[in-house]
Amino acid sequence: MPKLLWAIFCQQAVVDRFTNHISVINQFDEIHPVRPQAAAAQKPKAQGGAKPRVAAAFQCALVSLWEREKPTRSESTEMKVDLLGPKREKLAQFKVILDLRKHARTRQLTNMPGVPLAGEGTYRFVLRCRDGVKWRHTGVVAFEVKFQEPPRLH
């Protein structure tokens, strides 16, 4: 199973096509979206009585670097990422293939148009890899959400 070397939540990651170097732009430890309006917060409850969610629409990316557990053994597996809200509720999930058959290391770059929010607090991207039939925890990337007040029009 691949080993996670690092993972970063950022605004953007750019890979140079000639050198294969990566530039990470604006790492997010904390984001400050505008506080949702009262009307948005009073939407009907989601399925199962869950608290309604709003989306923070901004360009962002989750970038990670992986390497083979055994350098000479090629491998390929599935990675699953869950976005957990402040109360540890699952807000989003995506899966990708980590292909380490040709190279000993690989990067995974997932661009997103924003993230779903369920209030202020600590959010976590929880990374797992498939190990046979089980999912093994490989890492966490955390960030804080603190709302800012919308601008007042006079």
Image (spheres, grey):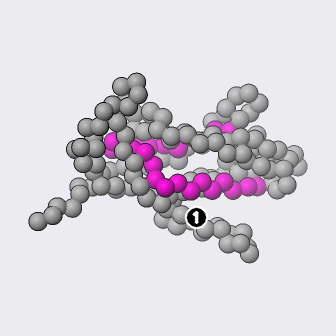
Boundaries of the magenta span = 105-129
Residue type pointed to by label 1: Ala
Residue 149 coordinates in the image, percent (x, y):
23, 55
Q: Is residue 28 left or right of residue 44?
A: right
Residue 70 coordinates in the image, percent (x, y):
83, 45
Q: Is residue 71 left or right of residue 9?
A: right
Residue 65 or 101: which is nearer the viewer? 101
Residue 119 or 59: which is nearer the viewer? 59
How dense is the environment of label 1, judged by Cα within 10 Å: few (below 14), some, or many (20 and up)? Answer: many
Residue 89 appears in the figure: yes
Residue for point 74% across, 75% down: 18
The kind of secondary structure the magenta stretch mainly shows is strand
Residue 138 appears in the figure: no
For mark 1, what is the residue? 13
Residue for point 51% across, 40% down: 92
Residue 5 or 46: which is nearer the viewer? 46
The quarter in which the N terminus is drawn is top right
Residue 69 or 49: which is nearer the viewer? 49
Residue for point 67% across, 45% down: 96
Is 77 one of the magenta-colored residues?
no
Residue 53 coordinates in the image, percent (x, y):
37, 40
Q: Answer above or below: position of 83 versus 49.
A: below
